[in-house]
Structure formats: structure tokens, C-alpha cells
């Protein structure tokens, strides 16, 4: 066993861990990443033999403009929605570009994390092969091991009697990898993005595929009026009541793909109250009746299920696409007690990052579910904030103020999103990043030109907008992020209406005075 001391120890070499390492290394910190697998990439490193991560046919459902490292765009030839091989190649290229690899210890699982009386962190790990025990100490720790590791298995009456196959989506790697699916009937339980991806993948071979959902969903096509859907989540929306956005978004979905009721989707909530389900391919498979939608499962029988409305379905396999539980098994009980909230998936963390009781020396990076857009730019802003804290350029508020903010955010989420364990870490990417950027003096809305400002208000601005120094290159990258025609139209409408109101107001004032 050896002990080495670092400024920052990072758990996990997925996108959140790598971007944290990049910024910490650039700031001159001594850094070590501990990674359980043999590769970088986290969920993007496809492995048919291990549970978790992408499956063979996964394509990201957020466009490359909003899911990328700042200053490091995806290659031009890659499509708007890269597949997992392209995402992994991109992550590997980033790791090489910033020489991060030599700071990673692979094949090592963090087994325990605790804080010593001196405030330093003690991290234990087990390396394979050989099961050798390791120990490191660090001034700070960043946990970037993701929140899609521990499958959530709901309790369904009668499941123990089922004679067919049962899987969780985290075990499903593609119709060519699991048991034979040709000519079989599959029931997919859960209608998030895993449910959609698994249903579409299995529908290519199975005889019949049904998705069971208790809440339905507004299914978003990948493109709306020719632009990736996430490009509609512009900055202006954070200043509008979310109900307006939700109404507009429902109209856009209906215009693009038809009324969801027609395809049996029966959304139980207004659009954008639950995490977006994206499924351009799904809509056409519903239209051709290769996939059907059913209600919740009341109980499982030996050979199938009974739905809530009493109808039945004979199934050879049940695939639970019911999401994940937030879990960090290596945390000591003491840390666990302060990090987790009272209810399922609730975390008691300021800006989803810091415990008021622990402070800045333990950070969670990427423990966020963006309600629109992608996680990566949020992780990058968190990483930059962490480094700024480390360099003492900024500091955290008092623990009382942090706790007040946590309570306020929890209250907001309870009202804004469906109040369920699925939406406990939901946040708006642009609003979150704008707030952190202001603290570290890196606001996106720095004046460059009226055209530029228009783009940053009525477009999403992409991942480069919060960089410290604006160079011509960066301005160009921000300008390369498309602004959908409808958002430009909205922009011109707002400007014209503003101008008309101002002119009318001035005319009235002048006529009153004269
Ligand atoms: N291609 C891509 O980019 C992909 C991205 N992802 C991302 O990974 C994350 C995880 O997605 P996913 O695995 O779909 O998980 P989610 O948590 O997003 O969805 C879980 C689904 O399971 C349902 N569910 C949960 N508990 C129960 C229960 N007890 N009984 C019945 N239904 C239940 C939920 O329904 P309800 O709403 O009623 O609670 C919901 O439909 C998301 O951020 C997603 O966007 C996932 C797959 C592919
Ligand atoms: C109002 C815009 C919705 C964008 C949805 C999204 O980001 C899907 C990944």
C-alpha cells in the first residue's frame, strides 16, 4: 500500500472528471483521476460485457453544439447528433490534447472516501487485477463518477412468477448482444430516453414491442423545423414564465409530429414538466405500428402482464427502463448522511455541488440533469468554479446561506417539475451556467455587437460562450451555433414590439407636454 498526497483527487474519468482535470492541471494543481474501468469516457465507453453505459446503437440526443468541451468543437464532418463511437473518439482526442492520460490510474475502484481530523481527504481504492489496496490523500476531492450507475428496479407485483427474461436497460447492449429477440415479444417498462432507445433497437428484430408508461410523454423529435430540438432552448426562455415555453413547445411538437394522443402517447403532464424524451425514430415506428404504447403495469403474470386498465400482454421479455438511483457507495456513513436528503434521490448540495456542512473541499461534478441541452458544459462550469475556489479567487457563502439556497431550489423543483425521484437534480443549463459564470467573472453576455447579443439571447450560444477571454476564434465558434429560424422570428417580433411600444410611449409623452 502507498500513500501520495494530491491537491485534487477526481473520482471517474468520464466527461465530468476529464474536464475537471483539464482545468485543474491548467491552473497548476497536482491531480489524480481514479477510474474503475480500463478506458476514459465513462458512459460513452461501450462495453458489451459490463452493465451500464451506452448500447451499440446509441446516438446522443443533444446536438454537438450543446454537448462539447469549450474550445474543442466536434469535427465538422460529424453529424449534429454524434453516435457513441464518435463521442468516445472525441473524448479520447481531448484527453490526448490536454495530456490528461498520465494523471489517470485505471482499473481502480474507489472503495472508501473519508475526511481526516485535519480536513484532508483519505481515498482508498482497489486495483485489478490482483485486488491490491491503494490509498491516497488529497486536499480536495471531486466526485465525477456519474449518477447512472445503480439501476432502479421498481417493485412490481408478481414479477417473481414471470417465466421469461427480465433485464434492466443498463444490461441491454443491443439486440445482437442479449438473448435471442427475433420473433419474440418485448415489454419495455419506462418511457424515458432509455425506454425509447431500447424499444427502437429491439423493434428491428422482435415480433412485437410495447412500451408501458404510467405518465406518458411529450416525445420530442430530434429536429424541429429543420433544427436540432435543443437549439430552441435559448437564453430568452429563462426570462419567460415556463408555462409560456411549455405551451409553445407543445404546439411545436404537434406541428412537427402530430397530436401525441393520436400516437397513444397520452402525456399526463404539461411539456417540459418532466425530463424531455427524445425520439424521432420512435414516432415513425409508432406510425408503422412496430411499437405500441400501453399504460402502467398492474401486475406481472407467468407469461406476461396485466395493465392498469385490465388489458393484458403476452411477453417473452420485460426490460425495465426505469432509470437510476443516485448512489456513491464509497462514501463513509458520515458523509452520506450530510450529502443525501430525506427522500429518494434528494441531495442536500449547494448548486448540486457542495455540502454546506463540508464546504469547498468536496465537490460533486456533473450531478445535474439538464432540463434542456447537455450536461457537459455544466460540468465544465462547475470544474472552473472549483478551480477558482481552490485558487481562493472566490469563496463559498456561509453554510447558512448555502442551506437556504438548497431549500429554495428544492421548493422550485417541486413546483416546476413533476415532483418525483426522477426530477430531484433537474436544472436549466443556461441559467445554471450564467449564474456560476457571473461569480467567476466569465459572463456570456459581454457586449461584442448587436448581432452577437441577439444570437446569445435568441439562440443557445453553445458551449464556448462562457470562456474567460473572447478571441476571434471563440466568437466564430459561438457564431457557428445555428439559431433556428423560429427563434430569429421571435427575436425580431420582440424587438419590433419593443420599438413600437417605445415610439408610441414617447409620442404620447411629447403630445401630452406640447
Ligand atoms: N441517447 C441518449 O442520449 C440517451 C440519454 N439518456 C439519458 O440518461 C438518463 C437516464 O434515462 P432513463 O434511463 O431513461 O431514466 P429516466 O429516469 O429518465 O426515466 C425513467 C422512466 O421510468 C419510469 N419509471 C420510474 N420508476 C417507475 C416505476 N416505479 N414504475 C413505472 N415506471 C417507472 C419513469 O416514469 P415516470 O415519469 O412516470 O416516473 C420514466 O418513464 C436521462 O438523463 C436520459 O436523458 C438515456 C438513454 C439514451
Ligand atoms: C424548449 C426547448 C426544448 C429542448 C429540449 C432538449 O434540450 C432536448 C434534449
Image: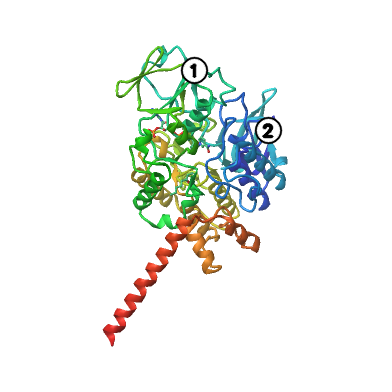
Q: Where residue 464 sits in the image (x, y, percent)?
A: 59, 55
Q: Residue at label 1?
A: 184
Among numbered discs 2 and 1, the one appearing first in the sequence:
2
Spatial CA span between label 2 and label 1: 40 Å
Q: Are marks 2 and 1 in contact (CB under 8 Å)?
A: no
Quadrant location, the N terminus: top right
Task: Name the outermost residue toward the left.
Answer: 512
Q: For the residues carrying marks 2 and 1, which lies nearer the camera in this image?
A: 1
Q: Where residue 130 sits in the image (x, y, percent)?
A: 70, 22
The one of 176 and 469 positioned closer to us in this rendering: 176
Q: Is residue 294 above or below residue 474?
A: above
The one of 260 and 360 positioned closer to us in this rendering: 260
Quadrant location, the C terminus: bottom left
Other-residue count near label 1 (Cα within 10 Å), few / some / many at <14 / 14–19 / ≥20 = some
Ligand 1 shown in quarter: top left
Q: Secondary structure at mark 2?
A: loop
Residue 513 quadrant: bottom left
Q: Where residue 192 sits in the image (x, y, percent)?
A: 45, 34
Residue at image location 37% in from the left, 34% down from the top? 216
Left or right: where 33 falls relative to 334 = right
Q: How is the model colour-coded?
A: rainbow
Q: Is residue 194 visible?
A: yes
Q: Residue at label 2?
A: 106
Task: Name the outermost residue toward the bottom.
Answer: 514
Q: Is residue 407 visible?
A: no
Q: Is residue 318 above or below residue 52?
A: above
Residue at image location 46% in from the left, 16% down from the top? 316
The one of 317 and 77 positioned closer to us in this rendering: 77
Q: How many marks?
A: 2
Residue at image location 35% in from the left, 26% down from the top? 296
Amino acid at each position: 500500500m502507498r500513500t501520495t498526497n494530491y491537491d485534487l483527487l477526481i473520482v471517474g474519468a468520464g466527461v465530468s472528471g476529464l474536464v475537471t482535470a483539464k482545468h485543474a492541471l491548467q491552473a497548476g494543481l497536482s491531480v489524480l483521476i481514479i477510474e474503475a474501468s480500463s478506458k476514459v469516457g465513462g458512459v460513452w465507453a461501450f462495453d458489451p460485457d459490463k452493465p451500464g453505459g451506452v448500447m451499440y446503437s446509441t446516438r446522443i440526443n443533444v446536438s454537438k453544439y450543446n454537448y462539447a468541451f469549450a474550445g474543442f468543437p466536434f469535427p465538422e464532418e460529424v453529424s449534429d447528433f454524434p453516435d457513441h463511437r464518435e463521442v468516445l473518439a472525441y473524448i479520447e482526442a481531448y484527453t490526448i490534447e490536454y495530456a490528461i492520460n498520465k494523471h489517470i490510474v485505471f482499473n481502480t475502484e474507489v472503495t472508501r472516501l473519508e475526511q481526516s481530523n485535519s480536513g484532508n481527504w483519505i481515498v482508498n481504492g482497489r486495483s485489478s487485477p490482483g485486488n491490491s489496496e491503494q490509498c491516497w490523500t488529497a486536499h480536495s476531492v471531486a466526485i465525477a463518477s456519474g449518477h447512472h450507475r445503480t439501476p432502479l428496479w421498481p417493485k412490481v407485483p408478481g414479477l417473481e412468477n414471470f417465466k421469461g427474461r427480465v433485464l434492466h436497460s443498463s444490461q441491454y447492449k443491443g439486440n445482437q448482444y442479449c438473448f435471442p429477440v427475433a420473433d419474440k415479444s418485448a415489454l419495455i417498462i419506462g418511457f424515458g430516453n432509455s425506454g425509447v432507445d431500447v424499444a427502437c433497437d429491439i423493434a428491428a428484430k422482435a415480433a412485437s414491442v410495447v412500451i408501458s408508461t404510467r405518465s406518458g410523454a411529450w416525445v420530442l423529435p430530434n429536429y424541429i423545423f429543420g433544427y436540432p430540438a435543443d437549439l430552441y432552448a435559448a437564453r430568452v426562455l429563462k426570462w419567460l414564465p415556463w408555462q409560456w415555453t411549455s405551451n409553445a413547445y407543445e404546439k411545436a411538437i404537434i406541428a412537427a409530429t402530430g397530436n401525441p394522443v393520436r400516437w397513444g402517447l397520452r402525456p399526463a403532464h404539461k411539456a417540459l414538466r418532466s425530463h424531455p424524451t427524445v425520439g424521432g425514430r420512435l414516432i415513425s415506428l409508432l406510425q408503422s405500428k412496430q411499437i405500441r404504447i400501453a399504460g402502467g403495469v398492474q401486475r406481472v403474470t407467468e407469461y406476461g402482464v396485466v395493465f392498469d386498465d385490465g388489458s393484458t400482454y403476452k411477453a417473452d421479455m420485460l426490460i425495465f427502463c426505469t432509470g437510476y438511483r443516485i448512489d456513491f457507495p464509497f462514501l463513509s456513513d458520515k458523509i452520506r448522511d450530510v450529502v443525501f436528503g430525506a427522500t429518494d434521490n434528494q441531495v442536500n448540495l449547494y448548486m448540486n455541488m457542495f455540502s454546506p456542512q463540508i464546504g469547498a473541499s468536496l465537490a460533486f461534478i456533473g450531478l445535474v440533469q439538464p432540463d434542456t441541452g447537455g450536461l457537459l458544459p455544466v460540468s465544465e462550469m462547475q470544474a472552473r468554479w472549483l478551480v477558482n475556489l481552490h485558487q481562493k479567487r472566490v469563496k463559498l457563502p456561509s453554510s447558512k446561506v448555502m442551506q437556504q439556497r438548497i431549500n429554495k431550489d428544492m421548493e422550485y423543483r417541486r413546483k416546476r417539475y413533476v415532483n418525483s425521484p426522477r426530477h430531484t437534480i433537474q436544472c436549466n443549463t443556461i441559467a445554471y451556467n450564467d449564474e456560476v459564470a457571473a461569480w467567476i467573472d466569465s459572463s456570456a453576455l459581454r457586449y461584442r455587437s448587436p448581432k452577437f447579443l441577439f444570437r446569445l439571447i435568441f439562440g443557445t450560444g453553445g458551449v464556448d460562450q462562457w470562456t474567460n477571454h473572447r478571441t476571434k476564434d471563440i466568437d466564430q465558434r459561438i457564431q457557428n451555433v445555428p439559431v433556428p429560424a423560429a427563434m430569429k422570428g421571435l427575436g425580431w417580433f420582440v424587438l419590433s414590439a419593443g420599438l413600437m411600444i417605445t415610439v408610441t410611449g414617447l409620442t404620447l409623452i411629447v403630445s401630452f407636454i406640447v
